[in-house]
Amino acid sequence: MNEGSAFDAEAKGGGTATFTAPTKPGTYPYRTFHPGMHGVVIVK
């Protein structure tokens, strides 16, 4: 789950970030620079 990426967004100093979600249906795991923070974006 920690290899590759479907998208990339970066927020610095407590800011916010936006990204364009994938349009192809599927599950897209993501992680952050915090070791315990990760999840999955699900596109239907």
Image (cartoon, rainbow, N blue to C red):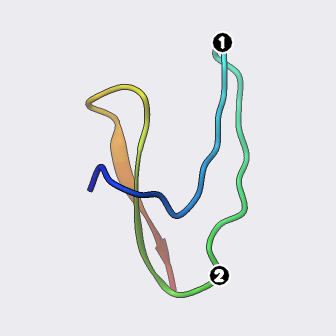
- The location of residue 6, given as percent across then percent down, is 52, 64
Task: Give me the disc on residue 40.
Answer: none
- The location of residue 33, given as percent across then percent down, is 42, 28
Residue type at numbered disc 2: Thr
Residue type at numbered disc 1: Gly
- The location of residue 38, given as percent across then percent down, is 34, 44
Residue name at image x 71 percent, y 22 percent:
15
Of residue 1 and residue 27, the one placed in the foreground of this image is 1
Query: Is 14 placed left or right of 27 in the picture?
Result: right
- The location of residue 2, given as percent across then percent down, is 29, 49
Q: In which quarter of the image is the N terminus?
A: bottom left
Of residue 12 and residue 44, the one placed in the foreground of this image is 12
Question: Label 2 to label 1, Cα distance in Å?
Answer: 29 Å
Of residue 27 and residue 7, the one placed in the foreground of this image is 7
Instruction: Determine whether 5 is above or below 42 in the image.
Output: above
User: How many residues crowd around disc 2 within 10 Å: few (fewer than 14), some, or many (20 or more)?
Assistant: few
Give the residue furthest to the front. Answer: 4
Q: Do the residues labelled 2 and 1 touch (CB within 8 Å)?
A: no
Q: What element carries label 1?
A: loop
Instruction: Determine whether 21 is above or below 43 in the image.
Output: above
Query: Is 19 placed left or right of 31 in the picture?
Result: right
User: How many residues crowd around disc 1 within 10 Å: few (fewer than 14), some, or many (20 or more)?
Assistant: few
Residue name at image x 26 percent, y 31 percent:
36
Residue name at image x 60 percent, y 49 percent:
8
Q: Is mark 2 on a helix, strand or loop?
A: loop
Q: Name the residue under label 1.
A: 13
Q: Mark 2 points at which residue?
A: 23
Residue name at image x 65 percent, y 67 percent:
21
Which badge, 2 or 1, is on the more N-terminal residue? 1
Query: Is 2 placed left or right of 6 in the picture?
Result: left
Of residue 38 and residue 8, the one placed in the foreground of this image is 8
